[in-house]
Structures are given as structure tokens and as C-alpha cells.
Image: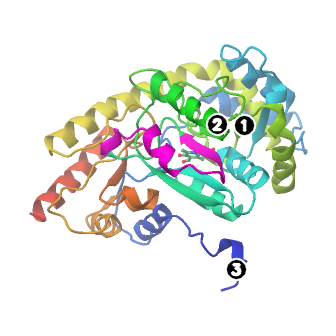
Amino acid sequence: MVEADRLNNVELSGIRRLFELANSTDRTIVNLGLGEPDFSPPRAITDALQESLKSNTNRYGPTNGIRELRDMISEWYHDLDNSTTYENVMVTNGATEGLMSIAMSLFNDGDHVLVPDPGFVLYPSHVRIAGALPVFYTLTKSNNYIPDVYELEKIVDDKTVAIYINNPSNPLGTVMDEDNINELIKFAKKHNLIIISDEVYDRITYDSPAISFWGKYENVIVCNSFSKTLSIPGWRVGYILTPPKFSNAIKKMHYYTSACPVTPFQYAIVNGWDKAESDIKRNVQEFKNRRELVVSMLKEMKLSFPHPSGAFYVFPEIPEHIKMSSENIAKALVDKDLLTSPGSAFGMHGENHIRFSFSNSRENIKKGLNIFKKWIEEME
Ligand SMILES: Cc1ncc(COP(=O)(O)O)c(C=O)c1O
């Protein structure tokens, strides 16, 4: 196999491996592995896309995105920082490209970057591809699955330049409160770190709204996306909010990676947004109903897990009597017609856990969790 050195320490994700295994069979598999909403996009958005295509929006657009969308996004953040304008907003090809552009434009060889474990799969790989070193902080039962400043103080050093924070969390489903956020801000200020705050699930919360890091510190970069909010992960539209001091560097990387974000989809989002709000609320309510179902079934099984208050994942611990790696458990469950994601795909401290996504109908969630329950019983 031919591969540049910079990719030597980077693997394709463990979630993909399981997905491919499940796809290789003809049997019907209950899919609780999905990292995307199972809803259709709001009609207002798809209608607006038809209109957008008819009005010749098929050309290259501005590198940072169309002005109308940047204006719309910047207004959402006025309450947090009233100096926010379109100039703080860069529309990206999904949060994925945004996160990659941030890493490639701000990290130098040998820099240290604090990364959550368990945490979303992109962060450590982006750090490594950029030539820097991921330094993991744990999100485990012992720290209530929330970043623990006491631990962060032990691992930060003079090479550390940034910290990734993901709130609400994939895979944990946890949502931080104001005190957690203020402590992290204090920590980042003390060490002059850039906070890269991945807030792609900010609209999907069940108990209290997610609090953005924007406006709380001059070195915060927020990364967000329309993938989950509008159920359009295939459209690849996300955005970055950044202070001016970082924007030029990120823009260069963004330009050389993708020239500009997808033009017709940006118009569709701007023109359909106002009429899409009710669909977003309805979908979040449905996720909330499923959250209740998942929580009650897992409690009945006497499993331990962080309370899912946001995103659409739950991350139970595997009962102690099962002495198998999470990847082998996930493979064994595929044999029983259930697709999940192994906890180890999210980092070393994800081992001994399985991620269930509740991005499937209540009927399928029940079916899937019953398969899991039966399998656990069989292993006793
Ligand atoms: C925490 C988190 N960040 C970023 C992304 C990437 O989102 P996008 O589809 O906008 O690239 C995902 C997708 O699953 C995610 O879970």
C-alpha cells in the first residue's frame, strides 16, 4: 500500500469497520450505530433547494460562504457577543472540513493538543495529520463524564496549544452546565490555550439548552454544522465562528482544501430556515421520547451509563461478567442482527462500553435493545 508518512498513525474509524461488516450480510440488521438523524430534511429546506437550483446557483461562491448565510448565522450569536458579524463566520463543507482546516492552519509540528477520551473520532487524527500530538483527557464515571480541570492541570505543559471540547458529547450524550464551562474557560485562559468547541449537537438537547463557548474568551473557535440540526449530513454544510486573529489562516486552508462551500445548499438553508424551525422542534421531541425509552430499558438491564441529555447517543458500560473487547462485542451483536458502535472506536477509555444511537424508530430501538439484553443474558 502506498501512503505518505503523515498518515502512518492514522486509521479509518472503528465505526466504519462495523458498518461495513453489517453491510456485507443480506440479513436485516437493526441499526443502532447511526451517527446521523433518521429523519427527512424539512420540506421547506428541500423546496428551497429546488428553487435554488432553478435560479442558477451552480457556480463557485465566496470562499467563506455566501453573505446571506453568514449574516444569518452571526445573528444567532449576537446575544453572546454583540460584536459578532458575518466576518466571524466561515461556512465550511461540514464540521469535518471545518475541524480539519482549523487543525491544519493552527497546529505546528510537535505541538500538544488536549483531546477528549472517549471523544469524537476525528480529533486525534486531525491533530496527528497536522503533525501535532494528541494528549488525552478522560471522560469517565470518576469525573462524571465531564472534563476535569484537576486532571487537565496535570497533563497540560508548555507545548500545549489547544483543547477540543465537544458539548453535547458524541459518544456520551452529556451536556455541560455553566460551572463546567466557566472552569474550562478559566483553565484555558491560564494556559493561553485555544478552545476548539465542537457544538454540532447544540440544538439537540432534552433537559436544558446547550451553552455555547462563543463570547466567553478571546481564543474560542466554535465549530458547528447543519448535518444534525436539519438532517442533511449528505449536504456537507457546516460553519466556524472565529475571532479575526485566526480567520486568515483558517481561510487559507479552507480555500486550498475546498475552494468554497457548496453554493446551492447554502441558498437552500438561508431561504428555508425560518420555515424549518417547527420540524427541528418536532424531531428533537421525537429524539426525547426515544431517549426516555432507551434510558428506561437500559435501567431495567441494570446497566450503568452517563445520562443522555443531548445528541442522540447513549454509552452504557458493559457488565463486568463479559470479558470481551468492545469491538468483539459489537461484532458478536452483528451476528445477532444488531449494529452498534464499539466504545473503543472513541478512545482507550471508551473500551468496556458500547454506543447505541437512538436515531431509529422506537420499534427498532426496542427490538435492538432486546437483542442486546438477550445476548447479555446468554453470556451469563
Ligand atoms: C461531534 C461531532 N462533530 C463533528 C461531526 C461532523 O459533522 P459534519 O457532518 O458536519 O461533518 C460529527 C458527526 O458525526 C460529530 O458527531
**Amino acid type at image mark 2:** Asn
Label 2: state its secondary structure: strand
Residue 225 position (above or below residue 98): above
Residue under label 2: 224
Which quadrant would residue 75 be assigned to in this image? top right
Location of residue 243 in the rendering, given as x and y in whole percent from the top left corner: 78, 31
Q: Are marks 1 and 2 in contact (CB under 8 Å)?
A: yes
Q: Is residue 213 visible?
A: yes
Left or right for 61, reference 92: right
Foreground residue among 143 and 25: 143
The earlier-in-sequence mark between 1 and 2 is 2
Q: Dot 1 corresponds to which residue?
A: 240
Residue behind mark 3 = 3
- The Cα atoms of the two marked residues, 1 and 2, are separated by 6 Å
Q: Amino acid at mark 1?
A: Ile
Ligand 1 neighbours mark 2 (CB distance < 8 Å): no
Magenta residues span 141-165
Count the marks: 3
